Amino acid sequence: MAHLFDFEKPIVEMIQKISDLQKFSEEKGIDLSQQIATLEKKVASLKTEIYGSLEPWQKVQIARHPERPNFYDYAPLLFEDFIELKGDRLFADDRSVAGGIALFHGTVVTVIAQVKGKGTKENIKRNFGMPHPEGYRKAVRLMDQAEKFGRPILTFIDTPGAACDLAAEERGQGEAIARCLQAMAGYHVPVISTVIGEGGSGGALALGVGNVILMLENSFYSVIAPESCASILWKDTTKAKEAAAALKFTAQDLLRLGVADEIVREPQGGAHNNLHQTAEELSQVIAKYLVRLREETPEALREKRYQKLRAIGVFEEAATINLEKGLD
């Protein structure tokens, strides 16, 4: 493994033992097949145990894995063709947001995605997946085009959050995100939003007003990054692990809370372990929901999307108990 997490070390150590035994067996001509088979069973069992009970912070680590597939990795596997369109026609082209037209299962769709880089050089070019206002304005331009021509919209969310530097504020970051939210709420075409990695803050929500919200198994979707949450609540970023547990932002949490509609399975250990398998799972799930949504009327699509957004965060107020009456 090129990049190893602490919780994966027992697996790697056992795999190394198997490799050593195989090498020793070949060199000495000794049959150790039974011992190797036993260790292989233990590895399989250990993987199931570790990856089947990941803590929220461990899921955050997987979602941020340096080799985790980004949109450009999935695009050739999901779409028969993808024509990228650039620029917001106002300021510049934001490389942390990719957008264009694609053919998905025979249907022409508009695709918008947040994109992180691979390695330091590319991450700097893509601002570590944190869009500036022109990125969101490009997204709105392309989604308005989709509305005009009746094309379904597929968005892919993967960002720590929107850019928060001086340049972003000078160019109207808050307005750009608000405009994105407003526009998506009003479209009459199907909108499917998929969280493929990090879904951080308003920068992620800007592309998340969908009729359907999908999440990869090891992704997360939150109003704030765990480090920022820890900094605000405890004035200590080292408590990010505690914040991750408290935020309830994993795919499993959000499915239970009704924010996500379905979890897309990943290979054991994360999407980076088998890109093609993950893309196939993702393709099937998106196709299933797209068929359903295309049966809805334009008015129903818009209204149900609005109601879905309004339902997030619903709570119930318990009746106040009169303790004095209870004691009488």
Image (spheres, grey):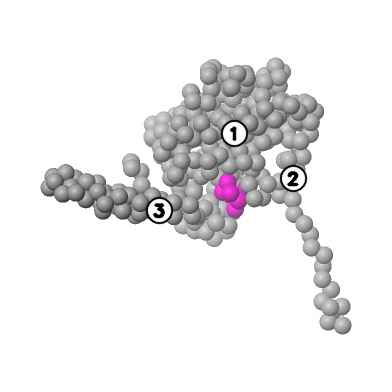
| Residue 17 percent location from the top left of the image | 25, 51
Would residue 283 be counted in the magenta stretch? no
**Magenta-drawn segment:** 248-254
Q: Is residue 307 above or below residue 248?
A: above
Q: Which residue is mark 1?
A: 285
Q: Is residue 298 above or below residue 14?
A: above
Q: Examine the rendering and report whether any part of residue 91 can be seen.
A: no
Q: Which residue is mark 3?
A: 45
Label 1's element? helix
Nearer to the camera, 127 or 22? 22
Name the residue located 22 percent from the left edge and 46 percent from the top edge.
Answer: 22
Q: Is residue 201 above or below residue 94?
A: below
Q: Tell me if 26 is positioned left or right of 191 in this view.
A: left
| Residue 302 percent location from the top left of the image | 76, 31
Going by the numbered disc 3, the residue's amino acid type is: Ser
Would residue 253 be counted in the magenta stretch? yes
Locate residue 274: give its quadrant.
Answer: top left
Name the residue located 38 percent from the left edge and 31 percent from the top edge.
Answer: 121
Q: Tell me if 95 is positioned left or right of 260 in this view.
A: left
Q: Earlier in the sequence, mark 3 or mark 1?
A: 3
Going by the numbered disc 1, the residue's amino acid type is: Val
Label 2's element? helix
Local crowd size for mark 2, using a 10 Å CA cut-off: few (<14), some (14–19), many (≥20):
few
Q: Earlier in the sequence, mark 3 or mark 2?
A: 3
- Find the residue positioned furthest to the bottom: 328
Q: Which mark is residue 311?
A: 2
Q: Earlier in the sequence, mark 1 or mark 2?
A: 1
| Residue 273 percent location from the top left of the image | 41, 39
